[in-house]
Amino acid sequence: MTQTLTLTVNRQAHELAVAPDTPLLNVLRNDLALNGPKYGCGLGECGACSVLVDGMMARACVLPVSAVVGHEILTLEGLVIEGRLDPVQRAFIEAQAAQCGYCLNGMIISIRALLNHTPRPSMAQLRAALEYNLCRCGTHMEILEAAELAVTINAGESLEAPHE
Amino acid sequence: MSDRQPTAAGAELPKALASPERFGVVVRPPHYAWDGEHFASDHLVAIERDSVAGLPGRIEVVVEGDFVAVVADSLTAAQDAARNLRLEWRTASGKGHDGSPAMVAETARELANEASSRALPPHRHDYGWPSRLRWGDIPGWVVADCSDHCLTLWVQTLTPEALSQDLMALTGLPAERITLYGASPARASGLGRHCGDDAAMDAALMSRHLGYPVAVWLDAAYDRDRRALGQAQRITLNANVAKSGEITDYHYHQEHASGNIAAVGLWLCGKAPGRRIMTDDRALFSPYAFRKAHHAERRDAQGADPHSEGLAEIQQAFARESFLDEVARDTGQDPLALRLRHLDDARGTELISSVSRRARWGEPPSPTITPPDRLHGRGFAYAQLPDRHQRIPEGVRSAWIADVEVNRVTGEVALTRLVVGQDAGPEVDTSRLQQTLQARVLGSARPLLGHTPAFDEWGDGSESSGSHGGALMETTTPPETGAGSTSLPMPLHEADLSPGVAVIANALFDATGVRFRQPPFTASRVRRALQDPGNPLQGADNGGPARRSGRRWLKVAALTAVASTAAMAWPWKGAIAPIQRPAANLYSAETIERGRLVAAAGDCAACHTAEGGRENAGGRAFETPFGTLYSTNLTPDEGTGIGRWSYAAFERAMRHGIGRDGRHLYPAFPYTAFAKISDADMQALYAYLMAQPAVSAEAPANALSFPFNMRPLLAGWNALYHDPRPFEPSPTQSDLYNRGAYLAEGLGHCSACHTPRNAMGAERRGEHALAGAMVDGWEAPPLNQLSRSPIPWSEAALYDYLRHGGSSLHGVASGPMAPVVAGLGELPEYDVRALAHYVAVQMGAPAGDSDAISAEASALLAAARSGPSDMEEGERLFEGACAACHLDTGTPSFSSAKTSLALNTNLYSEHPDNVIQSILSGTHAEHVPGVGNMPSFADSFSDSQVATLTAYLRARFAPDQAPWQDIASRVATIRQYNNNTPSPHP
């Protein structure tokens, strides 16, 4: 049963004719061609599909699209503002923290969500935040390195211009 | 907190009134009442001031006589303190505060003797007038400032003179030192007082004690004062009628002195002035000449103020003109002709004839098709108004004809046409009279007009009771016009309205056959009267209105007889003749809208819609211990739906479980609960269903095992287990409770799932009511004191759960409860509060969550931080599949579970079923945004993995509970059940 819903994705409103119980991930990838979020397990277990909803982490594969009407959705693509990458994205590039890269969307989104809430997390807090983001290549050490770097870059940027 | 303070834009309003900083709430005695002669109440014996000493903020208790109030920094704080304040009351003795009970008793006896010593003429009726017409117009602040030997008030009042008198009695101040500022269109009519005066007295009492301004919130809570103050006036009329139809003997007895009943606070503090009442046989003025007439009036010996005199005139005209109308109709005469034959006055006769011509009295209404839920009626009333020198015989003659339209389902009355003729004086502004009467007597001119919330009231206005929503507060600030105690340029004189109330009562009788002998005629009163089995319209042809005719009054008596016979000869098991499908627009839009709410509360569509099917077209399968049943098509399709069902057939099915063709319906259809639905709601539901698009869909044949496939056996089942009586509100319970009980026991059919059934499939009674049961492969947990929730429920938590689909201390609605919450989303706020209140009472739950509850929750969360060490496989499954959403990682998450599993009732249940179901099916609450979006793990876990995980969850999150025993077999059974029953969420 298709309905017309309005979604705010990456600061832009989209009117979409979709069934209200369609997973958000499907709408982002198929209807809006935003392929940053990945399809992993489809059960909310691995984190590859993560997006930000109102600045909080959300697993897009288990969220029906009707649940996010009226909320602000940001995908990996939306972290880029006027061509400038988010501090967390820059840290991952700098640390070259990728093997196959499939999980990186979820890693970056999770750290962004944590930093929105806790600007100076400890290593233990970073580990806890990433605990349920699965990586099959074994890049965990590089990812943690990137996460630490992200904290530093982010803190520096915050001094210059407060992050939203 | 949402305590918005009153603000005034008006420059002249004193600052003290515009922004009060202290808020008061009264604590009334358990029992207090005005019985027509005196006021009696319980007496205050002791007050434990310590009981509010520990509360935050500055709290002051005001006590004067039996008047008790609490004043605090916010309304909420004052309400809290009022709830906590411990008081001891002594039950009222017979004597009241009235100064001269002995004397009153004597005069009452006199009247009684007089009445019994004569043979009474055969026509006799009593007419009443309430002490308070309603609690108020809209919820709002009342502020009093009593300081420097002055009293100023911000108040809604209809009767500033009466209120001023009360305040003078309280303070001893002269009138010029009392100033009333008001939001009400003061003196828009003099039909009597409302509880704004009682709230004003309360505020004045508090401010006088404390010496600073105090604000009191006036809302439907003051309806208690209205009920306690009862009747201000009762007038008894007797008449003898000769065979010719002439009234030969006419008696008029006024029981009470014209009713200006002082404010409740004044009675309680013992300062209400005693009244010296005397019986007066001086002839009251009557415009009619009867062969023999006797008038007895009781009046205040000190003389009454002009306002009370005006009110007395209205009351007299109401009783007299209603009575003449009744006599006319009882004796088969035209009400207007009866008046004319007793009118020995050329001016009056000419006026009545002219008004009658102008209004086309006696002509049948134009033949327009009206909806069957609409009734029309016309009434007449006549009076003679005093002239400039207060002389009635020389005064203006005034003849009124009114047309009303009554919605027999909602009870709303509209004054559709008013013709008023007067033979002298300035032109009458009929549209203004019409508006005034509509607002004051019928009470449906504006939303939020204070009618009594009835148990089957839907939304309109009842929002004002219950909690104090922030939105309501906004409507209550003083108006921008600022000060001024009269905002209408030219107040109506009381007497101008004197035939107005009777003319409506007479028109209402013409429309409905019900005689209303006391104003106001609000929607809920009208509806209740229409549903009274004694009403001739009840049980009439197929729920349509009684046939209209030009001279209905000749037929009313006969109709009553026929209708009651028809009700007795209800064709119990026979077929009810099919009818032509009613047109979709047959019923009025208001009735259909009410029906939509009824359908939402009853959640018809949940059962009567098949997976992927059209709404209410039926075909959904139900597995029962007796076989498979399929729900039927509720759309008005003539072939496969209920299109050819008359209202009578529909009602019989709903109340007695018998289909139109006379076949018994299976009690999977909860007619046992639906029997409790009120008549008005039943009709509205019929109207709604008949207005929906017809869908042709034949339900599959039921597959029941023998002997359950023998429908006639159900007659015996019904005799044993079915009580078809409609819901009766309990007089000892609050309106909120009764509304909740009506919704829960009737439409909401909570017990259909939450009450265990016996071997014959009947709900068990007594202590088993709402004791929890298994349904549809899920457990419906106990809603009574057997609740096994790890954290005890509170009324506030129940409200959150029912309104928003989840409570932070208990988890979310899932399984078959999810569509129930979605259905409740259609219902007004008040209804959901009422449901929560009712369930809370069943559970013995407190109103809110205390700090102790929060501490208990924290302890449970701490205990579940790590799992048992010896369940490695379970832990691995949990970490892999569940932990990402069910454990707190420190990262704020939008999609994770909002409530820890440690607080989840399902893990504390005796049965593992709901945990297994949640894993296999996931949890979904469609149409309830943001709640419960757990995916199904049926395809990723084997039965043994589900069992291992379930055992682990129990051990980790309900560590003090015994392990479940038969998990593996339950998993297999439930999976098989789910596979056989197409789930709405594949």
Image (cartoon, helix red, strand yellow):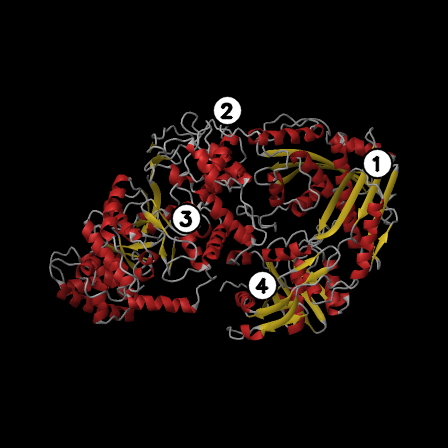
Q: Give the crowd class for mark 4: few <14, some 14-19, many >=20 residues within 10 Å.
A: some
Mark 3 belongs to chain = B
Q: Residues within 10 Å of mark 2 (few under 14, many from 20)?
A: few
| Nearer mark to the viewer, of 4 and 1 | 1
- The residue indicated by pointer 3 is B755
Query: Label 4, label 2: how many angstroms apart (C-alpha)?
Result: 63 Å
Q: Residues within 10 Å of mark 3 (few under 14, many from 20)?
A: many
On the image, numbered disc 4 is attached to which residue? Answer: B7
- Chain letter belonging to callout 2: B
Q: Nearer the viewer, mark 4 or mark 3?
A: 3
Both labels 3 and 2 in a single chain: yes
Mark 3 / mark 2, whichever is N-terminal: 2
Q: Residue at x 28, y 71 (%)?
A: A159
- Are the residues flagged by discs 4 and 3 from a single subunit? yes
User: Residue at left 53%, top 33%?
Assistant: B587
- Find disc 1 in the rendering and name its residue: B348
Q: Position of residue B76 (x, y in %)?
A: 52, 65
Circles 3 and 2 in contact, beta carbons < 8 Å: no
Q: Secondary structure at mark 2?
A: loop
Image quadrant in which you'd find residue A58: bottom left
Determine the residue positioned at 62% across, 32% down.
Answer: B564
Label whose residue precedes the other's in the sequence (4 or 1): 4
Q: CA distance from mark 3 to mark 1?
A: 67 Å
Q: Which residue type does callout 1 highlight? A: Gly
Front-most of residues B494 and A88? B494
- Distance of label 4 from label 3 (alpha carbons): 51 Å
In screen coordinates, is B432 left or right of B346? left
